[in-house]
Amino acid sequence: MKHHAFGRMPFTVTNVGFGAWQIGGSWGDISEADGRAALNAALDAGMTFIDTADVYGDGRSEKIIADVLKTRGDERPMVATKAGRRLNPHVAEGYTKANLEGFIDRSLENLAVDSLDLVQLHCPPREVLYQPEVFESLDTLQKAGKIKGYGVSVEKVEDGLKAIEYPGVVSIQIIYNIFRQRPDHLFFAEARRRNVAIIARVPLASGLLSGKISRETQFASDDHRNFNRHGEAFDVGETFAGVPFEVGLQAVEEVRKLVPAGATMAALALRWILMSDAVTVVIPGARNAEQARANAAAADLAPLSADVMATTREIYERLIAPHVHQRW
């Protein structure tokens, strides 16, 4: 794995990090023991960035991270969390300083720290991005020492472009993978110009790009790939990257032909993301230690050829773009 400066912040992170949504919940039955093993394996492999959120398992993910890091006692990785999705209803009016401070205080307790490395607004309603007072509140909380920096996790490219207009925004988290290529058209260049860190999430399109999902795959009732297939619980773009399931499976069969000998499709998909120098860190999740180790090893795959990159673009434009490109 390579190491990058995290935008304008005084952190250096590996280009592959650990996405901790799976160890929190909404991915079927993943035991706490498996979650701990996955995180330990990621750290053993050298990962120095962990991404979580206060709503992942209602704090379960944050607490597992705190316990594992306390037990290890070695050099602490950068830990990013998110705030805002505890609002019910999740509306722009709820993004007050009092609410944000309450969410941050809860994460400080869950993560057992005095200051959060990074807090990200968790895919807020678009109206929030047009309310300077929200970002002034984050500036105040940063000056108070409760957070070291703040960013925004966004659903849409347009929201990312708006968010980075605020000088205090140091990072954007956005879906970017073989099935979601639009961020590389304009947004990445602007983020690079402003030295904004890019966290690439949903890198495997909820497992589609692992190549291990078929039409016969059954998902548990508490797995978002079951209950959010059509956006019933949150933005459908978070599930299979918003690609209709059957279309995704068709595209996967074409991507499968590009996998180098001795590699996995998941490794190809992660290496594809790392081909962009705008990406600071990609955050695949892991259900167990084996998956975490495989994620780390993907960074060692040789750079993809121009022909492979061109073919993935052609597959995207022909099969996927009509369903996702203008939507996100």
Image (tube, rainbow, N blue to C red):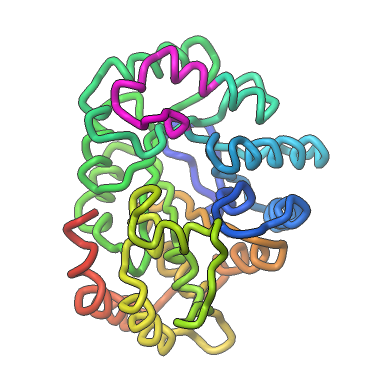
Pinpoint residue 296: horizontal percent, then vertical percent: 61, 62
- Residue 144 is situated, as x and y percent measured from the top left of the image, at 51, 10
Across and down, in percent, residue 230 comes to 33, 60
Q: Is residue 245 left or right of residue 318?
A: right
- Tell me the residue at 21%/58% (across/down): 185
Expressed as whole percent of the image width and height from the top left, the position of residue 48 reads 62, 46
Q: Is residue 32 above or below residue 111?
A: below
Q: Residue at x 39, y 62 (%)?
A: 229
Q: Foreground residue, 141 or 260?
A: 141
Q: Quadrant of residue 298?
A: bottom right
Q: Is residue 2 visible?
A: no
Farthest front residue? 221
Q: Is residue 321 magenta?
A: no
Please indicate whether residue 76 sits to the left or right of residue 166 in the image.
right
Question: Which quarter of the picture shows residue 323?
Answer: bottom left
The span picked out in magenta is 83-104
- Who's the residue at 55% across and 29% down the image? 117
On the image, which quarter does residue 145 sit in?
Answer: top right
* Membership of 93 in magenta stretch: yes
Q: Is residue 304 visible?
A: yes
User: Looking at the rendering, in which quadrant would you find the C terminus?
Assistant: bottom left
Rendered residue at 54%/68% (across/down)? 219
